[in-house]
Image: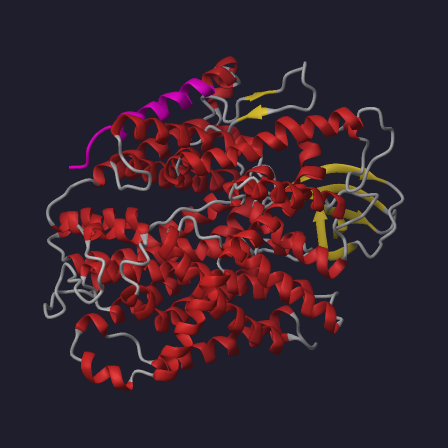
Amino acid sequence: MAAESPESAASFQPYVPAGTLVPELTVRAVVLGALLGIVFGAVTVYLALRAGLTVSASIPVAVLSISIFKWLGRSTILENNIVQTTGSAGESIAAGVVFTLPALIFLGFSLGVTDIPRVLLLALVGSILGVLFMIPLRHQLNVAEHGTLSYPEGTACADVLIAGEKGGSFAGKVFAGFGLGLVYKFMNEALLFWRPRPIYQPGWFPGATIAADVTPEYLGVGYIIGPRTAGMIFAGGVLSWLVTIPMIKFFGSGLTAPIFPGTVPIREMDSFAIWNAYIRPIGAGAVSMAGLFTLSRTLPTIVRALKSTVAQLRKGKAAESEAVAAIRTERELPGTVIFGGALAMILIVWAVLAFRVNPGVSGNFLASILVVVFGFLFVTVSARIVGLIGASANPISGMTIATLMLTALLFVAAGWTSGAYPAVALSVGGIVCIAAAVGGATSQSLKTGFLVGATPRSAEISMIVGALTSVLVVGFTLVLLNRAYTRVVPQSIANVELTSEMRLVGDMVHEGKSYQLINVIGSHAIPDGRYLYDPATKRIDFQQRVGIGSERLPAPQAVLMSTVINGILRQSLPWGLVLLGVFIVVVMELCGVRSLAFAVGSYLPIATTAPIFCGGVVSWLLQKVTKRQEGEVSSGALFAAGLIAGGSIGGLILAAIVGFELEQKMAIGTKYWPGLSNSSLLGLLVFVAMASALFVVGRKKLD
C-alpha cells in the first residue's frame, strides 16, 4: 500500500512505474471528475454555510470513480486519479468562496443573481492562481520531502485507488450513507415527520440552552473529523451556551437600558438574541486570535518553503530537464504557463475591481498586487500544512484573517476606509482564501499522483479543468440558498434619521409600497441588519432577514471576515466583547490546548456543535471496539462521507422547495400527527437510530 512506502524519495517506486504508459488524461475521466466536482462543490457550499466546516472530497470522489467506471467498463488507476483530482477542485473552491464572499452581505453590499458573474470571476482567479502557484512547489514538497511530509489524506486516497485497482469493492458504503442521508433529510426537514431541532431550555437555569440540529451531514462531519476535534468544537459551544449566555442573563436581568451592541435590555432577550448580540462578537475575537495562533505556528514552515522555492526558481529547470525529460512522472506544465497565467489573473482582478467593484477610484492596482503577493505566500503555507495534517484540517480562515488585516491596515494608512473599499479588501481576502484552499487541494492531489505513478502535467491540467467547471455552480448555489432563506418580517421603528452607520443598498417594493433598503452596521439605536425604510415618514416598517447569516445558514467564517474588515476600516467593533474572545483563546493556548476548533465552536450555535460531537462519539466508540487509528480509511468513514453528501444534497433540494414556497404543502407531518412531529424525544430517537446505523456499518471491515 502507498502508506507503507519507503522513506527515501530516491528509492521510492510508484504503483505505476515511470516507464509504463497507461490511459490517464482521457475525456471520460475529465468529464466524470468535472461532474463530481460540481456535485461536491454544491454540497460544500451548503455544508460550509451551515456549519462553517468542510471535509476533503478526494476519497469519496475516488471511491465513486472506481465504482462508476466498473459499471461502464474497465478503467486504469491513473484515470481514477484524474477523476479524484478534477473532482476535488469543486470542494476546495467552494470552501474558499463561502468562507469569504458572503461577507459582502454583512458589509452592506448585495449578493443576488446580478452578482454571480463577480463571484464567478473572483473564484476563477483564486482557483487558477492556487494551481499555478503550487506547480513550482511540487517537486520540493511531493518528491524531495517524501517521507518527511506524510500527506495523511493524500496517502489514504492513494490507498483507496490501489485497493480499487486490485479489486477492492467498497463504494456500497458511500451509496448506502448517501441514500440514508437523503431520505432522512427529506423526511425530517421537508415532510416534518419529526422535529428537526430538539431543544431544552431549563427553567431552573435561565439563559441555558441545549439543542441539536439532528441532521445526517453534521453526524458525518463529526465522525470524519474525529472525537478530539469534535469534542473541542462542542466544548466551545458549551462555554457559550451553558456558561456565557446564562452569565450575561444573570448579571443583565436587572438592567433597564440596553448595552451596546444590543438594542433592547438584556432581560427582554432570549438565549438566541443574546447569542446574536453578544456571543457572536466574542466568538469573532476568539476565532481571529485562534487563527493568528495557528498561523504563527507555521512561520518556520513559511520561511523554509519560501527559501526552497526561491532557490529552485533561481536554479531553474535547465540542468534538471536533460536528466528527467524522458521521465513521465516528472513532466509538468512549463514556467511560461505559470507566469503567463498569473499575469492574466492579475489583469482580470484589476478589471473586476476597476469596472465592477470600485470603479473610478484608487487602490485597484495595489489590490491586484496584494493578491499575487499574499496568494503565493499562503499557497506555499497551505501546501505544506496539507502535507502535515491533511486538507480537512487546513486553517484557511487564519490565513485569510491575516490577509484581511494587513490589507485593511494598508487601506487605513492610505485613507481608503469608505465607499467600496471594504468590498475591495474582501475581494483580496476572498481570492487569497480560494487560492490557498485550491493550492492545498492541488498539493494533496499531486501527492496522491506521485504515490500511484501519475503524470504531474496531466493532474495539473485536470485540476484547472475542475476549477473552470466547478466555479459555475458555486456562485449559483450561494445565491440560491441566500434567496431561498431570505424573509421580510414586520419591524416597526419610528423617527429614524439616516446616519453614517446606515448604508443605502437600493430600492424595494413590498406589499405594493416603495421603500429604501438600508443596511445598518454599528448603530446604537437599531440592531445590525437590513430594513425597509420609508423616507417620507422616517419609519422602518419591515426587516429583511437575509438568508446567509440567519439561524439556518449562520455562515460563521463569512461573518467573521466582515467583522475584521468593519473593525479596522470603520472602527465599528464592540472591542470589549472581541477582546473577551481574544483572551479566552489566550487562556486555552496557555493551557497547552490548540484553540482553533474550540474558538469555532464558541461562535456556532450549540444546535450545530452538539450533533457534530455525537459523530465524534461514534468514531471514538469504534476506535475502542475495532482498534483502528483515527483518520484511517474505513467502512465508517465512507458511510459518513455518504451521509454528508446525502444530507447536503437533501438540503439543496429543501432550499429549492423553500424558494418555490412549497414548504407548507410538503409538511404533512405537522398536518396529520402534530404531536409526534413536534416531539423533541422522537427527533432524538430517530437521530440515535441513524448514529447506531453508522456504528454498525463502521464495525465492518472493508472488502
Residue at coordinates 31% horizontally, 34% vertically from top-left? Answer: 177
Image location of residue 394, percent across then percent down: 44, 52
Of 387 and 270, nearer the camera is 387
- How many badges with numbers are in the image? 0
Of 561 and 315, nearer the camera is 315
Residue at coordinates 42% horizontally, 50% vertically from top-left? Answer: 42
Q: In the picture provided, is 22 more to the left or to the right than 131? A: left
Residue at coordinates 71% horizontally, 33% vertically from top-left? Answer: 274
Which quadrant holds residue 248? top right
Image location of residue 107, percent across then percent down: 68, 55
Image location of residue 457, percent across then percent down: 26, 71
Residues rendered magenta in the picture: 683-703
Residue 331 visible in the current orientation: yes
Residue at coordinates 14% horizontally, 65% vertically from top-left? Answer: 23
The relative height of residue 381 versus residue 262 in the rendered view (above or below) is: below
Q: In the picture provided, is 255 more to the left or to the right than 247? A: right
Residue 32 visible in the current orientation: no
